[in-house]
Amino acid sequence: MIKKFLPKSLLGRIILIVLFPIIMFQLIILFYYYNSLWERTLNRLSRSVAMEIDMIHSSVSRDIYYNGWGDSNYIEDEDKLFLESKMLANHFLMEFNISGTLQDQIEDREKNEGLVIQSFKNELSTRIEELFYVQEKEQGKVNVLIELTPDVFGSKYLEIQFPKDRITTSRNHVLLGWLLISSSILIIISFLFLRNQIRPIRKLAKAAEKFGKGQDIGDFKTSGASEVRLASAEFLKMKNRITRQIEQRSLMLAGVSHDLKTPLTRMRLQSETIQDDKIKKSLNDEIKHMNEMLTEYLDFSANQDVSSKNIVNPIEALIKIKNDLHFKENNIDLEIINDEDSWVNESIFVRCITNILNNAIANATKIKIKAETTSKFIKINIHDNGLGISDEEKKNVFKPFYRIDKSRNQNISNSGLGLAITKSLLNSINGKITLKDSYLGGLEVVIEIQN
C-alpha cells in the first residue's frame, strides 16, 4: 500500500530520501522545544509573575486591613491608602484596582485556554489560596481577579492587569519561521543539485531509446557523476560495436546479393535459348521466385530504411497509398475517425501498410481502413473479407519463414517474411501489430504507434 504513494521517478525518490530526514529533524526539534524548553520557559516566566502578583496581593490586603475597611474617606484616599502597593505594582509593570463585580469573568473562564494561560494559572494556584479568575484581554493584556477575604472585605475582588508578554516568549514565530525558511532553502538546494545529477541519466536513457529505434543520437557526450560517466562511456562503446557489426553485415549481405543475383541473371539469359516454351516458362518462374525470395531475405536481415529521418502525416500517407496505381484498382475504403497533428517515420510506415495491403489484396476482395491519430498515438485498423486466420495461427504468422497452409492461399513467391518484417519495423518506431477477427468476415490487422 505504501508503494502506491511513493514517487516513481529516480529524482522523486532521491528528493524523498533527502527530504524525509530534514522533516524528521525539524519535527524532533519542534517536539523538544515545545514539550521541554518552551514549557520550562513558560513555567519560569509564569512563576516569576505569580510571585509578583502574590506580593501585590499581600501588600493590598495589608494596606486595607491596617487602614480600616469601610472608612468614609476610603474611596477618596485610595491613592494614599494604596501608595506603597501602587509603587510596587508600577515597579512590576502592573496595574490594579478594587472591583465589586465579576463582570464577564465567569463566562470567559469557561472558554478554551491556551498553553500560556494554563501554565500561568498552574503557577498562580501554588501562590494564591483565595479564589481567582484569569482572563485574557485584547491588546495583549491579562486580567487576574483575586477574591479578597469575604469576612473581612465583603464581596470585593482585586483586579490586576499586566502585559501578556510577561508570561510568554515573543520569539516563537521567529523560531518557526527560521525552521520553515531553512528547510525550504535546503530542499530547494537539494532539488537543484539532484536535478543536475539526474539530467545525465535522462540524456543517456533518451540516447539509448533513439539508438534502439535506429535514430541518430547526435553529439552525445558523457557527463555527470563518475558512475553515470562510466555507464555513458560503455553505452558509446556498445553503440560503436553494434554500428560496426551492422556495417560489416550490410557489406556482407551486399556481397551475397551480388554474388547470388549474378548467377541467376546468367541463368535467366541462358533460359532464353531453350526451345521448349513449357520448360522455359517453368524455369523463368523459378528464377523469378528465387530473386523475390532473395530480396525478402536481405530486407529482413538488413532492415533497410529504419534510420530514415523523413516524417509524414499518417492520414496523408494512407491517402497517398490508397491512390497509388498499385492499389487504386482495388476495393479499398478509407475511414478517418480522428485526424490530429501527428507524425511518423515515412519509409517505415508506408512499407508496413503496403505489406499488409498486399497480403489483404491477395486474399480478399474488399478492404476497409480505419485511421485514428492523436498527439499521443496512431491507430490503424485494416479489415478484409478474406478467409481470415485461425486463433492458433495468429501468433505463429509473425515468426520468420512461417507459412500458413490452410487459412490463406499461398502464392508462389511467399517466403513467410512479410509480417515478420512488418513487426520488426514497427518495433523500431515504438509500434506494435496485432491480429483479430474482422467484422467483414476476414482478418483485422491493428497497428498502434505511440508518439
Image (cartoon, rainbow, N blue to C red):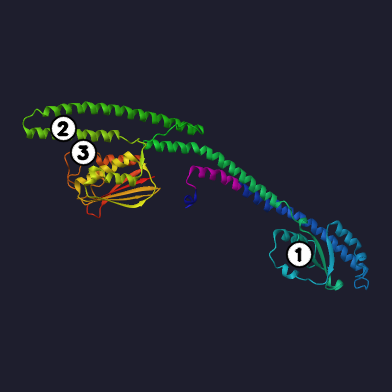
Question: Quick check: 212 above or below 168?
Answer: above
Dominant secondary structure, magenta: helix
Residue 217 placement, left or right of 171: left
The C terminus, quarter of image: top left
Q: Which mark is residue 287?
A: 2
The amino acid sitting under disc 3 is: Ser
Can see residue 398?
no
Q: Earlier in the sequence, mark 3 or mark 2?
A: 2
Q: Position of residue 445 (x, y in %)?
A: 27, 48
Asked if the residue under mark 3 is in contact with the one under mark 1, i.e. CB atoms within 8 Å, the reply is: no
Tell which of 24 and 351 is nearer to you: 351
Residue 16 on the magenta segment: yes
In the structure shown, which secondary structural element does the residue marked by tag 3 occupy?
loop
Q: Position of residue 12 (x, y in %)?
A: 51, 45
Estimate the spatial distance between the alpha carbons at disc 1 and disc 2, rounded to whole Å.
112 Å
Q: Nearer the viewer, mark 1 or mark 3?
A: 3
Residue 352 placement, left or right of 61: left
